[in-house]
Amino acid sequence: MARLGTETAFEVLVKARALEAQGRDIVHLEIGEPDFDTPHNIIDAACDALHKGFTHYGPSAGLPQLREAIAQYVSETRHVDVTPDEVVVVPGGKPIIFFTILALADEGDEVIYPNPGFPIYESMINYVGANAVPIRLREEMDFRLDVDELASLISDRTKLIILNSPQNPTGGVLTKIDIERIAQAIGDRNVMIMSDEIYSRLIFEGEHHSIMSIDGMKERTILLDGFSKTYAMTGWRMGYGVMRVDLAAQVSRLMTNSNSCTASFTQIAGIEALRGSQDSVTEMCAKFKERRDVMVAGLNKIKGFSCRLPKGAFYVFPNVTKTGWPSKTLADALLNDAGVAGLSGTAFGDFGEGYLRFSVANSIENIEKALERVSTWANKNL
């Protein structure tokens, strides 16, 4: 238990709420969830499902009708043939991370994961007693990984490689060439890939590319996706994994032993999310892009800050090394002194030192307020 880490965003949110309780005005740029409400058609589908009796247990792997919808969606978007038997529906995206690492990594095995990256990767690798091997995401490459460096990290003990694109916390996006070269680097070795594509619909430039789409890689890929980010459904707790049938059966067994099943009425809403109007996704992505542009332009005018333009997700990851302040100290100061809640880059791994993460899941008005406060603070303290 002592090896388990945490997700700092929730801890900072608690601190920010405590300051608000004291009468302080805080701009929230720490939490990683859309600030939009779930689209009405999805809410209506859930309400209708409740009235129709979808309030009981369902299969551990998910309702057949949702698994069919997911299989069709993934087949169309990743250009591979996916069957419902390869889909496991889970309460949120994290269970796929949890179950995959639990199932594939034993003590002494190696798991390569992106750093800075989603903190639960490293936490779970450490939890199972495997060796966490970070692959650095490099700012000079727009926070993509160096494939040659990745190839040098793969050893006989490597059991799993974790990819995340678009990436949290940096907004980095792997290119098609990156994906193809990663597949070549793995070659025919007995290494599985967990491809976390939870932000796949939130891309501002170019297209999303999945390693699952590469010839010969589908059988070795566990795809993680879900509804939280794309459809503003974070509180609904619904994600899914797509994997080989034999693996899906084992992950379903882990579901039986942990959660029993995902809530039935939310799964009916998930069908509507996938098959209903996608206008809300398009609109939300456009607003995130607009906010990203305002945020990055503003940060680049602040003393000690520099920020690249992220190509996906809804985060910016400014470089703050020129402030001379450690990331955690700076993040704390901006919260306590300036009323701006963000996260230290070190919340996402050791290679996050020298950076902060701000979410742009807030209004332009609030983003501009935050920028003004950070600028004022920097002018006084740097």
Image (cartoon, rainbow, N blue to C red):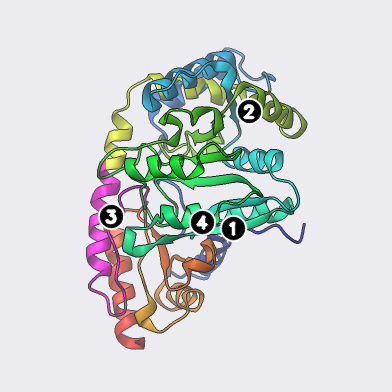
Name the image quarter holding residue 41. Answer: top left
Q: Residues within 10 Å of mark 4 (few under 14, many from 20)?
A: few
Residue at the image position 30 percent from the left and 79 percent from the top: 376
Q: In the rendering, which numbered label is found on residue 262?
A: 2
Q: Which residue is mark 4?
A: 152
Q: Which residue is mark 3?
A: 292
Q: As displayed, is residue 101 above or below residue 70?
A: below
Q: Earlier in the sequence, mark 2 or mark 3?
A: 2
Kindly report the distance in space between the C-alpha atoms of the residues bearing marks 2 and 3: 34 Å
The type of residue carrying mark 3 is Arg
The x, y position of residue 223, in whole percent, is: 51, 34
**Contact between labelled residues 2 and 4, with CB atoms less than 8 Å apart:** no
Q: Residues within 10 Å of mark 1 (few under 14, many from 20)?
A: some
Secondary structure at badge 1 equals strand
Q: Which residues are magenta?
A: 286-314
Q: As displayed, is residue 184 above or below residue 87?
A: below
Secondary structure at badge 3 equals helix
Q: Which residue is mark 1?
A: 133
Name the image quarter holding residue 170. Answer: bottom left
Quadrant where the image shows the C terminus? bottom left
